[in-house]
Image: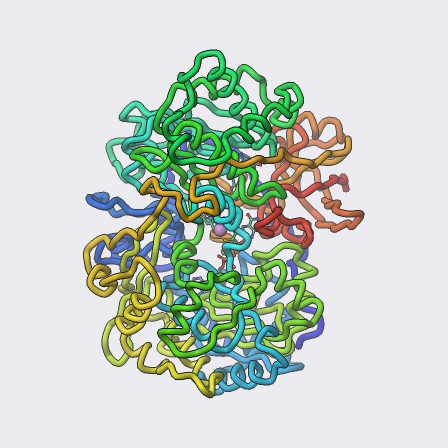
Amino acid sequence: MPKNPKEQPPEKLTGIRLKEVPKTSAGLKAIASALSHIKDEVGIKKGVQLLSKLNQKDGFDCPGCAWPDPDDKRAFLAEYCENGAKAVAEEATKNKVSPLFFATHSVQELSELSDYEIGKSGRITHPMYLPEGATHYQEISWNDAFTIIGNELNRLNSPDEAIFYTSGRTSNEAAFLYQLFVRQFGTNNLPDCSNMCHESSGAALSETLGIGKGSVTLDDFNHADLVIVIGQNPGTNHPRMLSALTENKKRGGKIITINPLPEVGLINFKDPQNPLKWIGKGQNLTDIFLQVKINGDVALLKIILKLMKEKEEAEPNSVFNHQFIKNKTAGIKDLLKDLENYSIDDLLPQTGLPLEKIKEAAQLIINTENIIFCWAMGLTQHKNAVDNIREIVNILLLKGSVGKKGAGTCPVRGHSNVQGDRTMGIWEKPKDSFLDSLEKEFSFKAPRKHGLDVVDVIKAMYQKKAKVFVGMGGNFISATPDTSFTAKALRNCNLTVQISTKLNRSHLITGKKALILPCLGRTEKDFQSSIEQFVSVENSMGVVHQSKGTLQPCSKHLLSEPAIVAGIANATLKKSLTNWTELVSNYDLIRDKIEATIIGFKDYNKKIRRKGGFYLPNNARDNNFTPTHTGKANFSLNKPSEIELENHQFLMMTIRTHDQYNTTIYGLNDRYRGILNERRVILMNKNDMKSLGLKKLDLVDLTSHFNNEKRVAKGFLAIPYNIPKQCTATYFPESNVLVPIESTANISNTPASKTVIITIQKR
Ligand SMILES: Nc1nc2c(c(=O)[nH]1)N[C@H]1C(S)=C(S)[C@@H](COP(=O)(O)OP(=O)(O)OC[C@H]3O[C@@H](n4cnc5c(=O)[nH]c(N)nc54)[C@H](O)[C@@H]3O)O[C@H]1N2
Ligand SMILES: Nc1nc2c(c(=O)[nH]1)N[C@H]1C(S)=C(S)[C@@H](COP(=O)(O)OP(=O)(O)OC[C@H]3O[C@@H](n4cnc5c(=O)[nH]c(N)nc54)[C@H](O)[C@@H]3O)O[C@H]1N2
Ligand SMILES: [Mo]
């Protein structure tokens, strides 16, 4: 292995420009930005052809977010958004990373580049191997690559010494085969990006409503009277959601936004799909904006619960849905008693809000029957993240606002098939019933011991208890917390394998030996045995549908993800009774196996050929909560944040810019926040800056504090921003060095990457 590849690029500032925060999102600027990325990466002609197939019923699923497509009509121009266009441009790029590229650049040299520069190198064209002690990757045949993996896996003392990570772009077909291979090999070590993402939502919703997924459909937005968007920035991360919110508003629906930042898209939005609206003022979406402090959400929701309770006691039957509570729920008495333990005066400082403002929001909730709560990482990445989400459920249950039209839970998923991967069994804690049906269908003994999640696999590699790492997509080193710790962990491995489309830092921070296996992307045609295949994915609302690429693959040496899994399985499993080669010769055969083992997939091959796909069963949507441990929807008792900042300390949230897809950096601009050409910035309250003696664009170093441990990230520019006192924001992944590996959410073990305690030192 090369001596000391950098886990972080050297601090290199790129020449920042600050602008006014724009008053509206999307509109003509979004179209211009989308087209400019398409032009630079793909070329205009091919690019426009591509966009015309994006999210159409006969096209491919957008590799961007998991927001659903309309069941009936799809937009005239195409069902895409600026950031969807960027995601497509990034995958369909003209730039190639060939064996010559690797011969001329050492791993050491590449690791000096920023994530942005690494990503822009392009698509990987050949399988590549980094032998022990080598400085450069070398071309390798697929067969030899599979043999190396098989040999290393079979050399382990136990299958539990191997780790099989999945990012959320992998199709249902590939994910199903992958988990089947891993379980036949003998382990449940199947961590995935969900562990860092919506794991807290899954944990909270399973316990309270009996299903780890959200309950609403896209059509529910046409019937909701109130949508509450909390801890989410849809203008950047789920832009098509704003169209649903716009429709809702047109019908007279109201919107409450709860966020430490006044995120532009939620405040004012011009629908880029509607040319008549490109010019003009745009739609003001938010009715009530609660600029909560970071991690002040439980305190805020508890105040709302207390106000609801007060009103109900003063005027019985004016707030609660008693019939729903009596028939469908358990635990109301305990909840109402527990609320007595908190006083509004004590809770208020955590929210940073005036009580009047909270009362206004509570009144709207009290007066409304059909409520949808939408949320994302602003709620899931805290120590008390599961409490955040259970507290939301408490409000919905008191109102009887789940399991009926226009109401319910909407955890807005990230990766475009992260939900489908879970449905296919990518989970370190599989249910016995799932393993039972796998065993029956495939005649093998599945491991029953639960496997390790993302944080625990990092610790296992660090302690040399795990020795082979395989990544099905994703960028493990950059996405995970505590970058230096995780780098050491990965370097301890005998072998690291990355199945990837594009070059990323995880190809450069490796085990003693490393392999890069390049695969087809969503946008590309997939032929097996001379027949064109399609795959399927599940969106954020449980709709399973087809995705079929339209481009020629960027290199003829690529394999599909299912074919790569079959290659690894054939090279590893000596006694498997599964015919892996046959299964990947026709993906219908994989879908038959999915139908035979997973509930909800009856007539899979038939239904997946219906335009628009089909809905999976969802008990909460059907007003049925029997799968919970009480057989009813459960109220829960939740705790506000226990973080107490010292005077000079700040809370830091690590967030996405408008110009990135997780660790893939499209560009250096955060247009919606008015910050251009620089990512090493920290957004601060202007009074906090004053008290630290900081001026705009002063250079600072950041130190995080956890259990007497310190972690340092150097060279950030301070920017005065509209953010509550003692709250700050930096961009992920640059600040992941500061997120302690031990700082995770209770129950879900999700890294608390939105509540990092820091101090700020002026240079
Ligand atoms: N273009 C683009 N699209 C994406 C992605 C991308 O990187 N780029 N990533 C995809 C993925 S995997 C995911 S999971 C989603 C992520 O989607 P988001 O969750 O919207 O992404 P983040 O940037 O992490 O934003 C978190 C939001 O929560 C707010 N927030 C932070 N802390 C708190 C808090 O304590 N309380 C409250 N109320 N709010 C808080 C922040 O101000 C910010 O607005 O997007 C998906 N879609
Ligand atoms: N500090 C901090 N850390 C975070 C977060 C945060 O908000 N703050 N967010 C967390 C969240 S929500 C998530 S989901 C994770 C994301 O973690 P990951 O999913 O691991 O990271 P990505 O950046 O989405 O992965 C990008 C890489 O995937 C590969 N890729 C792209 N498309 C395909 C494909 O079709 N097939 C295959 N095989 N590979 C493909 C490319 O090589 C690309 O470089 O990060 C988490 N980390
Ligand atoms: Mo995510």
Quadrant location of the N terminus in the rendered image = bottom right
Horizontal side of 624 relative to 484 (left or right) equals: left
Image vertical order of residue 631 relative to residue 188, above or below? above
For the residue pair 434 and 127, the one nearer the viewer reads as 434
Residue 186, given in percent of the width and then of the height, sits at: 52, 76
For the residue pair 139 and 745, the one nearer the viewer reads as 745
Considering every residue shown, the one lying at the far top of the view is: 314
Say which residue appears at 57% left-offset and 50% top-offset: 748
For the residue pair 649 and 588, the one nearer the viewer reads as 588
Residue 200, given in percent of the width and then of the height, sits at: 53, 47
Image vertical order of residue 670 relative to residue 400, above or below? below
Say which residue appears at 24% left-offset and 32% top-offset: 276
Residue 151, given in percent of the width and then of the height, sits at: 55, 86
Say which residue appears at 37% left-offset and 39% top-offset: 29
Image vertical order of residue 574 relative to residue 641, above or below? below
**Is residue 36 at least partly visible in the picture?**
no
Say which residue appears at 23% left-offset and 52% top-offset: 612
